[in-house]
DNA sequence: GCCGTTTATTTGTCTATACATAAATTCAGA
DNA sequence: TCTGAATTTATGTATAGACAAATAAACGGC
C-alpha cells in the first residue's frame, strides 16, 4: 500500500475519511472511550490488531495510541497492552474539588448530611438551566457539609438520570454525591462559575453565620458527549474557604 | 547508525543522556523556550537542522516537535518553519483572565487608572508572600479597572524585576500590567486562590459600593522555572463579576 | 508597479524494518 | 510447592525513504 486511504469496513462519517489516518484511529478510539462503550480498565485492541483492522503500518497505530496516552485517556503497559484510564479525576486541568477529600486532607473532621432527595422530571426552569429537554428524569439532592462540626458548605445538585441511571440506586447518605460522581462517572467538558454574594437569612441560618456575610458561590456543570451529567451550586462562608487551583505543566 | 546514543557535542546533563532521544530534543527546546532564550515568535531550527545537530532521522525530530506543537509551546507552518508560540494566554488549562479583554468582549467600555507605581526592594513581609529573598527588586502597582465608567476591580500587583526587568521601562498607564504581562512574559506554573470577603470602608469607597457588600477576591501568582514572576490580588464587587473557567478537550 | 504562475522548501503523513525493553508467562529445578 | 531462569509478546524507540500538501519566494508578462 502506498499511502492514504486505509481499508475501512463501512464508511461512517464523512469528514472523518478525509482526516489523516492516525487522527482517525485516535478519534475512533476516543469516541468509544468518551461514550462509555469502552469503560475504564477496558483493554483496547493491541497495536497489531488495529494495524490489521485499519490495514496500516504499526507506526501509524502507534502514533495514535501514543497521543491518547499523552492526553491521559489510556495507559500503556509493555507486554500487557493498552487500557482505558480511570475517570479523569482531574487531568491537572480544571480542578474538580472533592470537598470531603479537601477537608480530610487538612486534618479536619468531615461529616455531611443529605437534606433532600427527590427524583422527578425536569421542569421548564431546570431544563433551561441544565440545557436538557423538559421532562428529562432528574435526581435533585441537597446536602450540607461540615468541617469539625461547623457548617462548611451547602450543596444543591441536579443529576441527569438519563446519563447516569445508576445514581438512582446509590445511597447518598453514605457517600456524598460529589465524591461518588467523581469516582464513577467520566466527563469530558466542564464549566466553573464563581461569584460572591451576601448571605440572605436562609443561607445564613443553614451555614450558621451572620446574615450578610460574604459567601463564595461555585457553580459547576459537567458534560459527556455534549449531554449534561450534573450541575451543582455550592455555597461556602467566605471566611472559611479558599478555592485553590494550581497548574504545573505535565512533565512527560 | 543503528540505534540509541546519537551524536552529542558536549555532554551536559547526566540523566538527560539516558532519556530517549526524541524526549531529549523536546526537553532541550522546551528549556530554551521556558527560560526565555527563545522568545515568543522566535523561529526554531528547521527539522533538517536539528536532525544534523542531533545526528538522527527526521522522524525523531518530527516526533519531538509535533509533541511540542500539541502541547501548544510552538506553532508549525509549512514552508515557513516552527515558531515559539505567543505566551500561553491560556493553554485551555487554568485560565488567566485578562480583565480588559473580558470587558471589551462583553461590548462594554473599558478604562483603567494606575493609582500607584513604586519601584523598591522587597520587605520581609513581601518576600515571604512572594517566596523570594528580602531585598529583591520589586515593582508594586495598584490600579482600578472600570467597565462602562463604573469601578469594576481593584488590582494590587507585585512584579519581580529580577525576572522581568523590562517591566521597569513600561508605561503601565497605557497598557494595564495584567495585559502586558500576559502578552510578553511566559510562565510555567500558576496558582489561583479565590475567596469572598465583605467590603470594608476603604474597598467600598474604591469600588463605589456599599460597605459590607460581598466581594470576590482572586489572588494569582505565576512562576517561571520556580522563580516568582508576579503576584496579584484582584477584588471585584460580587454582583458584578462571574469568574468563568471552562474546560473542553483539545480537539486536535 | 502589479498580478498571476511557477518553483523551492518545509512540514505532514505513511511505510517497512529493526532492535530494545519491560513484564507476564512458562518451565525447570530444588 | 516454591523459586528463579528462560521465553514470549507488546510496547518503545529509531531508521531511511517516499510522496503529499501548503505556502513563501522568485519569476514573468503586462
Image (tube, coloured by chain):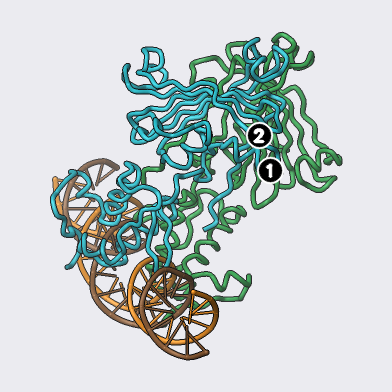
Chain colours: A green, B cyan, C orange, D brown
Circle 2 residue:
A193
Tell me the quarter of the picture where residue B14 sits.
top left
Chain ID at mark 2: A
Badge 1 and badge 2 both on one subunit: yes
| Rendered residue at 60%/42% (across/down) | B246
Q: Secondary structure at mark 1?
A: strand
Q: CA distance from mark 1 to mark 2?
A: 16 Å
Q: Residues within 10 Å of mark 1 (few under 14, many from 20)?
A: many
Residue A100 visible within the image = no
Residue in front for this viewpoint, C2 or A243: C2
Tell me the quarter of the picture where residue A235 sits.
top right
Tell me the quarter of the picture where residue B80 sits.
bottom left
Circle 1 residue:
A229
Residue B33 visible within the image = yes
Image position of B217 (left or right of B81): right
Above or below A181: residue B230: above
Image position of D4 (left or right of A4): left
Image position of A43 (left or right of A96): left
Chain ID at mark 1: A
Residue B119 position, x and y percent, is: 40, 22
Viewer-side label of 1, 2? 2
| Rendered residue at 65%/10% (across/down) | B201
Amino acid at each position: 500500500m502506498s499511502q492514504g486511504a486505509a481499508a475501512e469496513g463501512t464508511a461512517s462519517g464523512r469528514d472523518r475519511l478525509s482526516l489523516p489516518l492516525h487522527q482517525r484511529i485516535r478519534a475512533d478510539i476516543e469516541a468509544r472511550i468518551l461514550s462509555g462503550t469502552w469503560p475504564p480498565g477496558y483493554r483496547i485492541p493491541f497495536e497489531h490488531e488495529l494495524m490489521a483492522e485499519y490495514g496500516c503500518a504499526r507506526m501509524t497505530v502507534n502514533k495514535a495510541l501514543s497521543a491518547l496516552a499523552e492526553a491521559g485517556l489510556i495507559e500503556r503497559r509493555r507486554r500487557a497492552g493498552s487500557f482505558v484510564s480511570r475517570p479523569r479525576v482531574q487531568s491537572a486541568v480544571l480542578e474538580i474539588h472533592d470537598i470531603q477529600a479537601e477537608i480530610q486532607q487538612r486534618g479536619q473532621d468531615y461529616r455531611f448530611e443529605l437534606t433532600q432527595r427527590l427524583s422527578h422530571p425536569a421542569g421548564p426552569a431546570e431544563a433551561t438551566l441544565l440545557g436538557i429537554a423538559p421532562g428529562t428524569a432528574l435526581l435533585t439532592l441537597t446536602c450540607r457539609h461540615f468541617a469539625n462540626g461547623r457548617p462548611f458548605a451547602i450543596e444543591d445538585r441536579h443529576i441527569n438520570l438519563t446519563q447516569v441511571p445508576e445514581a438512582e440506586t446509590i445511597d447518598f447518605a453514605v457517600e456524598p454525591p460529589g465524591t461518588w460522581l467523581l469516582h464513577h462517572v467520566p466527563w469530558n467538558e466542564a464549566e466553573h462559575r464563581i461569584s460572591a454574594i451576601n448571605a440572605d437569612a436562609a443561607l445564613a441560618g443553614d451555614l450558621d453565620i451572620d446574615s450578610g456575610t460574604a459567601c463564595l458561590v461555585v457553580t459547576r456543570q459537567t458534560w459527556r458527549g455534549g449531554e449534561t451529567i450534573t450541575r451543582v451550586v455550592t455555597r461556602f462562608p467566605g471566611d472559611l474557604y479558599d478555592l485553590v487551583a494550581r497548574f504545573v505543566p505535565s512533565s512527560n
